[in-house]
Amino acid sequence: MIELRNLERSYPIATGRSWVLRNIRLAIGEGDFVSITGPSGSGKTSLLNVLGMMDHEWSGEFRFDGQQVQGMNPRQRQAFARDKVGFIFQHYHLIDDLSVAENLDLPLQYRDVPAKERAARVGDVLDRFQIVGKKDLYPNQLSGGQQQLVAVARAVIARPRLLLADEPTGALHSSQGQMIMDLLQQLNREGTTIVQVTHNEAYAKMAKRVVSLFDGWLTEA
């Protein structure tokens, strides 16, 4: 599904360039579950931002479903990512003045899904994630684990081909973190392709594959 070849990312500095990704070669198949590990500053989030097409300042080759991402302009990449990719962030990124149901409905509005279908999808996701009773609450009325549960539901409601998770358990205590990881495994078993960044060794091993970044260089365990 995804193939990266000779992908590199750097930033200009006074003495030249600072490299954050070096000669990345990575293939991710349909239905894969990959953990990216490595110390802080090793390039993990940078790689995730490239995969999610949030960063355009890289060089190399990036194929997604056979299409050459490097050949797209920024607007094309944004539209392609909107249709293909879902995101889960460490700090939830829910909109505080929208209810749970409204937070779930928002990504469908961006995709011009008809109102009747949006309502059906929101209802299905609320039921599946067992948060029907929370649908009219606001994020500040939820626990951290509940907010992250809503964030996962929001990420998958548009049925993305690829789910990217940046430290999805980093702000949670252990039982909440385990709940989120169990949910990611369930989504993967159902066919969702997942790439997560994590510092947690046990959670990393819950994926099918583990790759490590160190000073921008990628190795696979």
Image (cartoon, rainbow, N blue to C red):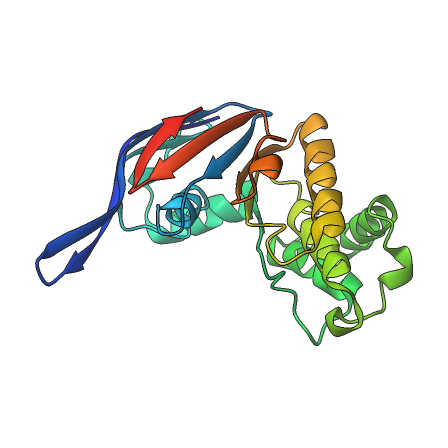
Name the residue: 91% across, 60% down: 133
Quadrant of image for the C terminus: top left
- The mark total stands at 0
Residues 206 and 56: in front is 206
- Spot occupied by residue 115 in the image (x, y as percentages of width and height): 76, 57
- Spot occupied by residue 213 in the image (x, y as percentages of width and height): 37, 38
**Residue 161 seen in the current view:** no
In the visual, does 60 lie left or right of 74? left
Quadrant of res 148? bottom right
Q: Which residue lies most toward the left here?
A: 15
In the visual, does 159 lie left or right of 141? left
In the visual, does 180 lie left or right of 84? right
- Spot occupied by residue 210 in the image (x, y as percentages of width and height): 50, 29
In the visual, does 198 lie left or right of 140? left
Name the residue: 74% across, 33% down: 186
Name the residue: 71% across, 49% down: 174
Residue 136, placed above or below residue 174: below
Q: Which residue lies most toward the bottom here?
A: 97
Name the residue: 41% across, 34% down: 212
**Residue 211 seen in the current view:** yes
- Spot occupied by residue 156 in the image (x, y as percentages of width and height): 67, 45
